[in-house]
Image (cartoon, helix red, strand yellow):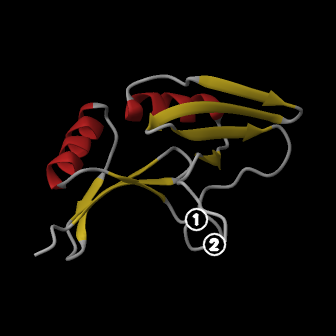
Amino acid sequence: MPEINGYAHVAITVSDLDASLAFYEKLFGAGPVGRIELDGLDRRLFSVGNGQILGVTAYTEGKAVAFDPTVPGLDHIGFAVSDRDAVVAWQEHASAAGIDSDLEEPDFGTTLMVKDPDGNQIEFFAAAPQS
């Protein structure tokens, strides 16, 4: 089987591009690094590190409904960070930016979940240290 070297990008669909751009600019501390405009599609590209891109997409056709992680499809996007302190730093950053977040510490690590205006879930995760 051919090798996979990692994720190049993830693209999510949003109902209100302006509201979502404002959210992601606050979350990532920077605006989009690119834009793709095609017939019926407007996508903004955010650099999330290590050459990876998050695409935030609005379509001119279709039905905009709020995200529901219980419906088949995407559950959440999880970003790996170095350790618990890095997750806490993301929590502090989100709070300072006015973004609600939920920090949890199950046995397997530390996780911080935020939701964009459509309810798309973004997670920052550090695995528990191995003993």
Q: Residues within 10 Å of mark 2 (few under 14, many from 20)?
A: few
The percent coordinates of residue 82 (x first, y second) are 24, 51
Residue appearing at x 55%, y 41% in the figure = 54
Amino acid type at image mark 2: Val
Residue appearing at x 72%, y 38% in the figure = 58
Residue appearing at x 45%, y 37% in the figure = 48
The percent coordinates of residue 33 (x first, y second) are 56, 23
Outermost residue, right side: 39
Residue at the spot of label 1? 68
In-front residue for pair 79/18: 79
Residue 76, above or below 33: below
Mark 1 and mark 2 in contact? Answer it, CB < 8 Å.
Answer: yes
Q: Residues within 10 Å of mark 1 (few under 14, many from 20)?
A: some
Amino acid type at image mark 1: Asp
Residue 43 lies left or right of residue 5; in this view the side is right
Q: Secondary structure at mark 1?
A: loop
Residue 114 lies left or right of residue 65; in this view the side is left
In-front residue for pair 62/79: 79
Residue at the spot of label 2? 71
The percent coordinates of residue 20 (x first, y second) are 55, 36
Residue 58, above or below 83: above
Classify residue 131 by image quadrant. bottom left
In-front residue for pair 14/1: 1
Residue appearing at x 24%, y 74% in the figure = 108
The percent coordinates of residue 119 (x first, y second) are 52, 53
Image mark for residue 13: none
Residue 122, above or below 93: below
Q: Secondary structure at mark 2?
A: loop
Quadrant of the image for the N terminus? Answer: bottom right
Residue 61 lies left or right of residue 80; in this view the side is right
Q: CA distance from mark 1 to mark 2?
A: 6 Å
